[in-house]
Amino acid sequence: MKLHRGEAFALILVAAAFLMTAALYGRLPDRIPSHWNARGEVDAYSSKPFGPFVMPAVMAGLFLVFLALPSVSPRGFRFERFRGVWAILQCAILGFLLLIHTLLLLAAMGRPVDMVRGIEAGIGLLLAVVGNFLGKVTRNFFVGIRTPWTLASEEVWMRTHRLGGRLFVLAGLAMFALALAGGGPIAMIVVVGAAALVSVVASYFIYRRIEGFKEDSRDDSAQ
């Protein structure tokens, strides 16, 4: 299988996670922090030899899923029209996981790491990147704002994703700023939730304005 340039870079990110873990393996303790609570306290550990490689393995699994999804997408909802954007989204997600894995390894080696703030800031940047390219994603069953109304109409999909893309860029930047300022998870959930809710509700009203429900009304009256 020939990889797109972006897919090749995504594979490099996966390889970097394995190589970094292997290079630092001897400096890691027997118990590796694997989860932090909302207060930034470690509340779960994994153990050698497999614990340090869990995140790289997850990244490898996701990479394979990302490669498989275009081939199983139904006809009429293919990925070819946005394959370059799909590769960028893969890199953004895998890059985020690599960031988290790097912070995890640093914390395991005793470095002072604010894991919660790092994850929140990383999610904010990820949302901003995804939102920036969301308007270029065409109709499919796996990626994007998939509501009954966007899947029913190419025009509704396009307009909804243009709006949703802007909202998620703003939400991502706001989340990044809140993370740096120590705004806490509740404020971030509200920001991201608002962007998602507005996008879903907007898809209905965009559909109603463009397509309407007249045909359904005639069918109901005929019965």
Image (cartoon, grey):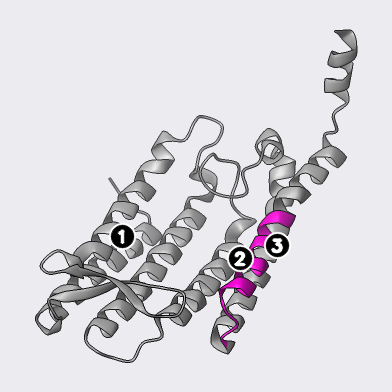
Image quadrant where residue 166 sits: bottom right
In the displayed structure, 64 sits above or below 94; it is above
| Circle nearer the viewer, 1 or 2 | 1
Say whether residue 195 is magenta. Answer: yes
- Give coordinates of residue 64: x percent, y percent: 31, 49
Q: Which residue extends farthest top?
A: 223
Main SS, magenta residues: helix
Q: How far is mark 1 from mark 2, CA to CA?
A: 23 Å
Query: If you read the primary sequence from the N terminus, does the residue marked by circle 1 or circle 3 appear first?
Result: 1
Residue 83: image tag: none
Q: Which residue is mark 3?
A: 194
Q: Residue at x 51, y 38 (%)?
A: 78
Q: Secondary structure at mark 1?
A: helix
Q: Residue at x 66, y 57 (%)?
A: 196
Give the total number of marks visible in the rendering: 3
Q: Residue at x 69, y 62 (%)?
A: 195
Contact (Cβ within 8 Å) of mark 1 with mark 2: no
Query: If you read the primary sequence from the N terminus, does the residue marked by circle 2 or circle 3 appear first?
Result: 2
Q: Amino acid at mark 3?
A: Ala
- Give coordinates of residue 201: x percent, y percent: 76, 49
Query: If you read the primary sequence from the N terminus, does the residue marked by circle 1 or circle 2 appear first?
Result: 1
The region drawn magenta spans: 182-198
Q: Which residue is mark 1?
A: 59
Contact (Cβ within 8 Å) of mark 2 with mark 3: no
Left or right, 11 with respect to 120, comes to left
Q: Amino acid at mark 2?
A: Asn
Residue 132: image tag: 2
Q: How far is mark 2 from mark 3, CA to CA?
A: 17 Å
Residue 162 visible in the snapshot: no
Left or right, 39 with respect to 202, comes to left
